[in-house]
Image (cartoon, grey):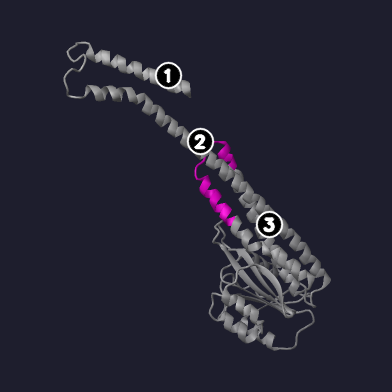
């Protein structure tokens, strides 16, 4: 098996990687010309199938698929519509799968989620994406390391499990960040935690919105799978669906936890605002006597008391200090 690096690139037809899969031997890597020849040939060993992974950012990819792959029209319609709703459904004798996954260089931004479109048939699996995705890249590396997949359905199940592993890692890292925010909150260090929580909550909301339909679509598929799907694959798909549902429930629990933290942070902010307003009120009350007296004595009119007295200044200072002390006693006693 050739191991030349096509990690993010593609050939002249937009093919990122192609494999001839067999349940009896390691996968054989193909380029687009070899894949076209295999698709045109009727000499296919029992159990063998092709997996072709395309970059939709390449303008020639859809043209090549239309010319050589003989895929259902529904697959090209979903590509052109840019449908992002997660689902796996039966189309004629094949499966149409729309899977959402995080970008390869994922950095916990809600915008870093993209779609993988798949067509799964008895002899051909086609996957296509516009941005590098983690789950499909993990599957590709596993195939290159020599992992054998006995059927197209086994490849789809492997991809779903890789997607689940990616989501579990996302949930684990989000949980770690939430723990750090809670520690800061308990220590009284708010910092930028509100913005961090908002980012994490938007990420979880978008992931759940995109991924929530997946278990339901898989259960519907299990009710009436294609004839070429055997009982073992159906059982593994059912187990994968149940595990995926657990991950979605964990996401819901994290959203509730973030919501409670946001409410707690809002309460802390309100408490700080109230404390600041109280301090401002105290300062205003304490400054009130001196402002009133200064305003009265500053009027240039006749009859100002103590204007001719040698001790007038100190008498006024004593009066101001007395009224200020009285105001301070009243304010702190009320608190």
Magenta stretch secondary structure, dominant: helix
| Figure quadrant of the N terminus | bottom right
Residues marked 2 and 1 touching at CB (< 8 Å): no
Mark 1 is surrounded, within 10 Å at the Cα level, by few (under 14), some (14 to 19) or many (20 or more) other residues, namely few
Residues marked 1 and 3 touching at CB (< 8 Å): no
Determine the residue positioned at 72% across, 58% down.
245
* CA–CA distance in space, label 2 to label 3: 35 Å
Nearer the camera: disc 2 or disc 1: 1
Image position, residue 299 (x, y; %): 20, 24
Image position, residue 6 (x, y; %): 59, 72
Determine the residue positioned at 57% across, 75% down.
81
Q: Which mark is residue 271?
A: 2
> Can residue 77 be seen by looking at this rendering?
yes
Mark 3 is surrounded, within 10 Å at the Cα level, by few (under 14), some (14 to 19) or many (20 or more) other residues, namely many
Residue corresponding to mark 1: 329
Q: Quadrant of residue 159?
A: bottom right
Q: Is residue 54 magenta?
A: no
Span of residues in magenta: 182-203
Which element carries disc 3, helix, strand or loop? helix
Residue corresponding to mark 3: 248
Q: Extreme right residue here?
A: 231
Mark 2 is surrounded, within 10 Å at the Cα level, by few (under 14), some (14 to 19) or many (20 or more) other residues, namely few
Q: In this rendering, would 271 be left or right of 99?
A: left
* CA–CA distance in space, label 1 to label 3: 58 Å
Residues marked 2 and 3 touching at CB (< 8 Å): no
Q: In this rendering, would 145 be left or right of 79?
A: right
Q: Extreme top residue here?
A: 310
**Tag 3 or tag 2, which sits nearer the N-term?**
3
């Amino acid at each position: 098996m050739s191991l030349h690096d096509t990690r993010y690139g593609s050939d002249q037809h937009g093919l990122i990687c192609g494999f001839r899969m067999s349940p009896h031997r390691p996968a054989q890597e193909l380029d687009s010309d070899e894949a076209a020849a295999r698709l045109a040939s009727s000499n296919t060993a029992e159990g063998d199938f092709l997996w072709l992974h395309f970059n939709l950012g390449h303008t020639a990819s859809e043209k090549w698929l239309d010319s050589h792959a003989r895929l259902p029209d529904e697959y090209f319609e979903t590509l052109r519509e840019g449908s992002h709703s997660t689902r796996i459904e039966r189309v004629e004798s094949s499966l149409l799968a729309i899977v959402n996954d995080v970008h390869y260089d994922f950095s916990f931004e809600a915008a870093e989620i993209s779609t993988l479109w798949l067509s799964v048939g008895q002899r051909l699996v086609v996957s296509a994406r516009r941005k590098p995705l983690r789950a499909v890249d993990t599957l590709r590396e596993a195939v290159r390391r020599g992992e054998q997949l006995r059927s197209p359905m086994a490849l789809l199940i492997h991809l779903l499990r890789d997607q689940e592993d990616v989501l579990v890692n996302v949930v684990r890292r989000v949980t770690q960040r939430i723990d750090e925010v809670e520690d800061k909150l308990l220590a009284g260090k708010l910092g930028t935690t509100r913005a961090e929580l908002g980012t994490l909550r938007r990420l979880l909301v978008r992931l759940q919105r995109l991924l929530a339909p997946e278990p339901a679509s898989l259960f519907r598929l299990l009710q009436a799978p294609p004839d070429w799907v055997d009982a073992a694959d159906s059982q593994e798909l059912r187990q994968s669906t149940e595990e995926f549902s657990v991950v979605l429930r964990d996401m819901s629990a994290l959203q509730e936890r973030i919501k409670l933290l946001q409410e707690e942070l809002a309460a802390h902010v309100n408490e700080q605002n109230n404390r600041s307003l109280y301090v401002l009120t105290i300062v205003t009350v304490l400054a009130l006597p001196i402002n009133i007296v200064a305003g009265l004595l500053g009027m240039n009119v006749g009859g100002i008391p103590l204007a001719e007295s040698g001790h007038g200044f100190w008498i006024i200072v004593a009066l101001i200090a007395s009224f200020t002390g009285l105001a301070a006693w009243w304010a702190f006693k009320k608190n």
